Amino acid sequence: MKGILLIGHATISQGVLEALELFCGNLEQVEALSLELEQDIQEFSQKLKAAVDAADTGQGVVVFCDLAFGTPSNVAAQLLNTKEYKDRVQIITGMNLPMVLEYTQSRTAELDFSEVVQVGKEGIIDLNERINNK
């Protein structure tokens, strides 16, 4: 089973983890890491590597990141340029609860990551429009 690492700015990753635990209970091989205000990038990079190592039991880690091309995703992307991490890490940006929940509930099966991304996209709904167009 692949590990899961949730990363993002401020406390978003911890919030997503708490929501996952509300739905799924206590989860194994799931880590959350936040980039804090004025945190040193080198320190965040070291914590990121440690979190990947903690979540990985040999099958790799899926890293869900809050924002494409923000500092957390940019630091994670640097892992793809290293021998030690490039084959162990799959990074998906634009993290939202539907996509992470979908992956968490089916991560023991071989899941196409395009399906995970699609679930994330489908979870974005203008509810006012949907209700008013019934």
Image: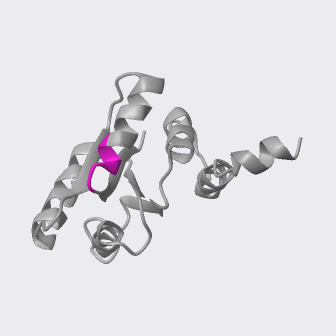
Q: Is residue 58 visible?
A: no
Above or below, 90 against 109 in this view is: below
Relative image position of residue 6 (x, y in whole percent): 35, 50
Q: Residue furthest right?
A: 134
* Horizontal and vertical percent position of residue 76: 31, 67
Q: Residue drawn at (40%, 21%), measured in percent from left and top?
A: 25
Q: How is the image coloured?
A: one colour
Q: Residue at (50%, 43%) from the top-left corner?
A: 97
* Residue shown at 56% from the left, 36% from the top: 106
Tell me where residue 130 appears, x and y as whole percent. Answer: 79, 46
Residue 91 vertical position relative to residue 3 in the rendered view, above or below: below
Q: Is residue 102 magenta?
A: no
Q: Image point 37% across, 51% down: which residue?
A: 61
Nearer-the-camera pick, 124 or 28 = 124
**Tally of marks:** 0
Locate the C terminus by quadrant.
top right
Please tell me in which quadrant of the rendered image residue 3 appears.
top left
Q: Mostly what secondary structure, the magenta segment?
A: helix
Which residues are drawn in magenta?
10-14
Quarter placement of the N terminus: top left
Where does residue 120 sit, x and y in percent of width and height? 60, 52
Front one among 63 and 131: 131
Q: Is residue 115 visible?
A: yes
Q: Quadrant of residue 41?
A: bottom left
Q: Nearer the viewer, residue 2 or 7?
A: 7
Left or right of 27, for residue 125: right
